[in-house]
Amino acid sequence: MGAFLLRRIFQGMLVVLGVTLVVFVATRMVGDPAKVMLPLSATDAQRAAFNHQMGLDRPLGAQFITFVGDLSTLDFGDSLWQRRPAIQIVFERLPNTLALIGLGLGLAVTLSLPLGALAALRPGGVADRVVVFGGLFGLSLPQFWLGLLMIMFFAVTLKILPTSGVGGPSHYILPAVTLAIPSLARLMMLVRSSVIDELNQQYVRTARAKGMRFHTILFGHALRNALVPFLTLAGWEFISALAGYTVVVETVFAWPGLGLTAMKAIERSDLFLLQAIVFTVAIMIVIVNILLDVLYKLIDPRIKLA
Amino acid sequence: MTEMDMMSEAALLEIDRLCVEFDTRGGVVHGLRGVDLSVRRGETLAIVGESGSGKSVTAQAVMGLIDVPGRIASGDIRWKGQSMLSREGLAMAQDIRGKDVALIFQDPMTSLNPLMTIGAQIGEVLRRHLGLSKIQARTRTEELLGAVGISAPRRRVDQYPHELSGGMRQRVMIAMAIACEPQLLIADEPTTALDVTIQAQVLELLAGLQETLRLSVILITHDLGVVAGLCHRVAVMYAGKIIETGLADDVFERPSHPYTQGLIRSTPRLDDQMERLIAIEGSPPSLLAPPTGCAFSPRCPLSEPKCAEQPPLVAVHAGASAACWHPATPAWREAPALAEAVS
Amino acid sequence: MAVTTHAAPPTAAKPRSGSFRPIALELWHDKAGMIGFTVIVLLILMAVFAPLIAPYDPAIQSVAARLKPPAWLPKGSWEHVLGTDQLGRDVLSRVIYGARASLLVGTSVVLLAGTFGVLFGLFAGFKGGRIDDLMMRLVDIQVAFPGLLMILLIISAVGPSLSTMIVVLAVTNWMIYARVVRGIVLSVRQTPYVEAAEMIGCKPGRVLFKHILPNLTSPLLTLGILEFTNIVLAEAAMSFLGLGVQPPATSWGLDVSNGKDYIFVAWWLITFPGLSISITVLSINLFANWLRVTTDPQEREKRFARLKAVERRRNGAPAGAPAKA
């Protein structure tokens, strides 16, 4: 267990190092921070002063070392937009994003299990067709469009839900549902196909030969085994939501989370804020990945954490 | 108990003209084409035949394991005279399976749920059929594991299938099958997937259990050597039909059907001088469009025009019946390879 | 299981997937797959011949004809079938031209990422050992990157454009091909016939072309098609966020973004471009779903059995029970 954690932490550090390199290359070498961050009217002298102030006129090697040093103390520099430490803004906005993801994915996870299992009971039957077609349909809706349609329908036409922003519980409904739908479609289709697979496994035939009741076979055997791939995909959904796929939903619903903040940072060419967000998320992904591995071990005794 | 006593006792399980069909894109595959079979209390019946002959399908039909793309097209399966396929029988069958009739599968590697401890998997049957509590089930499971020769059962109860060897897993499967002290045990090639040394141990265990528990056993196998020592009666299957059945000793001594003769002739024996195995030439017919007559006739040396008609299963002599128009006629000259070896 | 031994001969006897006619016939019989396929063909034609089909230049503005509703609404006119936007541009023409961005980005990203990923996976799978380990670790690391945020960061540093978007999407989407290909190479190399071929001294190139590529075509085709839908959605999302296709060029995502401030007054501005994205992706999904099953003999057999079972259930006989008991 200890060795496993160490290895995963080491691997996580490699990920963070990789992200560091890409961010460094993208911001300092490919792009020109002075050009991006200063107004177009800035003079050459102003640009030189900016570069000097930020240490951008030093050799790349030296720049990289300072860069890594700053990161290790969570010092991402001050946000140019809000004139305060970028990490502060990140920690302010993070809970909003996590709440959105938690609600949206929670919805997707809880609905996908019964719907997928229901479809799997009679492959080719009515429920199955509805689930498969619904799944394909859900996968085909662009999230931003879905969000706008729902605003148009529930907020503008019916006027029963708020259009955007944060507030009471009703503010959560549309963003969470929008975030949930593609994940729900994917998870539901996966549950369906893996339960179908599991129900055809030899060990299920054993259970049937034992005279076990159908609900025991479905819940105790098939669904439990189907949880292994389900966990993989649910974890992936969580990570990709973290990795920025809430940007679209947050933008549509003006949801003040990390994604919307990232978009604002881009609009204002606030590279420091943007890199703070990217790093925080990278580290969170590493942690979530490790937690997922531990969770696997709990579900599947065959997995050895070594 | 004498042979006659057993004969007189009512049948435990009767299979009556059972037909099983499978829907495939190529057409309907006739897996079983009217199988009649019965097993009496305390008796060991062997079903032999090559793969695809319908041995396993028969076992699956009894256990209610035929499902899409397969289906029972006609016929009946009766447990102590009561149909297991009728509307009322289905519920009864559900309670019988795992309790009074139990099945041991061929492949112990895939037959256990990988995510459950073996204790939970055995305990599950006990709780389902005998209504034991969790604690009672655990105690009983430990006893059962001991009974099938697993050492340190107390520790094994909490282990997962992947922690056990193939032979151990088959013992677990057997423990699961005998958990509710069934009257009939169906063993579907129980040793095929195991190492040769372990095969003998498992068979010995089965034979021992049969004696102590007074079990009826259906042993499905393609290994005639296994049958000879263990079974009272034999049914030989070919292309979805039973083509010969009788007391094991009789069938082996005086095989009536040419296929049975060929099967025995092609079984290697330790005491023989034969240098090579003699196979029956040709291959079994496609069950997509099974022949209307004797399915073996294309491979049979005795084949004649009459064989285009299905021969009925009739008594050939006291101990056996066969489905053949010229039963008990030697189909092959006595072992040509032996003659060659001598000269 | 005995069933598979029965099922094997008929499957083998059927014409191989190489022959075109039976496949086309099967597609014809699968309603959903056929609709998907037809729509895909129409979309490609629409994108290629956009200048001939579109009634207007998609960029031409007209102050006089601003925010006109679609033709079938009270204030609409047949001059602008799907209405006009806030700058008086013809929505129908923009929808027709918008197909170009989706298909162009989708195709180029799948080709770029696919080629790189496939080569990467082939190499890793063939070399095996430590090189394979190292290469796959690299894949793992990139998979653990915060995908979209990295894309945002790179694009904001480099500046948004069509070609930037294509490169960035390719760079962030090649890993899945590498994983799939490597997995197949490893499993195929372990099959007895390939081991035998390698043992008798078949050259790696020959093993690759004779044994491994045929096993790759079907899964890669399906994967490529599904990835294509992902890229179409990603392109739309990025253009919606203003980081993809830049005006005056058009894209469905960009159009939805343009219309989003007018949802109170002009629902058609977001509806038609969004619908186009959905229909495109849905059609491809339907077709891919059919293709996946059809190119896999086992899946095909299962699909047949299910249809048959449903048929029998409809006729009243429960599966597994005797017809006459």
Image (tube, rainbow, N blue to C red):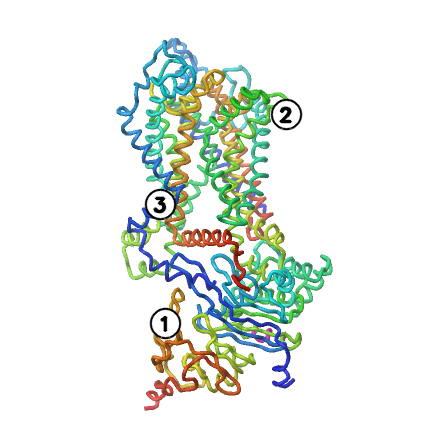
- Do discs 1 and 3 share a chain? no
- Do discs 3 and 2 share a chain? no
The amino acid at mark 1 is Ser
Residue B100, percent from left and from top: 64, 68
Q: Which residue is mark 2?
A: A169
2 or 1: mark nearer the eye: 1
Q: Which residue is mark 1?
A: B283
Tell me if I can see residue A184 in this picture: yes
The quadrant in which residue A50 appears is top left
Q: Residue at x 60, y 74 (%)?
A: B205
Q: Which residue is mark 3?
A: C27
- Tell which of B242 and C206 is nearer to you: B242
Question: Dot 1: what SS?
Answer: loop
Residue A174, percent from left and from top: 56, 26
Tell me if I can see residue A70 in this picture: no
Specify start and end residues of the magenta stretch as a single range.
B203-208
What chain does badge 1 belong to? B
Question: Dot 2: what SS?
Answer: loop
The amino acid at mark 2 is Pro
